[in-house]
Image (cartoon, grey):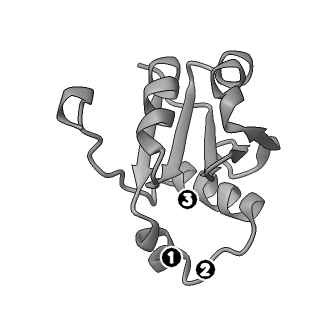
Amino acid sequence: MLSPTRFIGLDIHKAYFVAVGVDAQKQVVFGPQTVSNHLLDAWVAKFLLPTDAVVVEMTVNTFLFHDVIAPNVHSFIAVHPPNVTLITGVKVKTDKKAALTLAQLHAVGMLEGVWIPPEPVR
C-alpha cells in the first residue's frame, strides 16, 4: 500500500464538520471547508482520495464518520481528545485550528488512534 499523500483533519460537531488537509511537509493543501453533516456522503465522494489519511477526535458521531469515510481512504483514525491537548499544550479555540492541528500532528506521526470496534460490537 502506498503512503498517504494528504493528511485530512476533521473537527466534527453535532450538525457540521470542518476539514483541513496538509501534505507530508505540513503545508495546507486542502480547505478549510465547513460542511453540513448530512452532506457527508457526497463530500467524501467528491473530495477524498484513496491516498488520504483522515484523523478525527473521538466524539458522539465518530462511528458514523468512520463507517462512511474509512472504505474510501488510505486510513482513518480517531484520537482521544485529551491526548491532542497533551501533545500541543494548548486547548484549540477554533474549528479551523482544531482541524489543522489534527492534520499536522497526523502528518508527522504524533497521533495514535483508539480502537474502533466493528459494527456488531457497538
- Image position, residue 106 (x, y; %): 52, 52
Which of the two discs, 3 and 1, sits closer to the camera? 1
**Residue on which disc 2 sits:** 91
Q: Earlier in the sequence, mark 3 or mark 1?
A: 1
Which of the two discs, 2 and 3, sits closer to the camera? 2
Q: Are marks 2 and 3 in contact (CB under 8 Å)?
A: no
Q: Earlier in the sequence, mark 1 or mark 2?
A: 1
Q: Is residue 102 left or right of residue 29?
A: left
Q: Residue at x 74, y 38 (%)?
A: 36
- Image position, residue 120 (x, y; %): 20, 27
Q: Residue at x 52, y 46 (%)?
A: 55
* Type of amino acid under label 3: Leu
Q: Secondary structure at mark 1?
A: helix
In the foreground, 16 or 109: 16
Q: Residue 85, labelled with which disc?
A: 1
Q: Are marks 1 and 2 in contact (CB under 8 Å)?
A: yes
Q: Is residue 86 left or right of residue 99?
A: left
Query: CA separation, marks 3 and 1?
Result: 11 Å
Q: Earlier in the sequence, mark 2 or mark 3?
A: 2
In the foreground, 67 or 37: 37
Query: CA separation, marks 1 and 2?
Result: 6 Å
Q: Secondary structure at mark 3?
A: helix
**Residue on which disc 3 sits:** 105
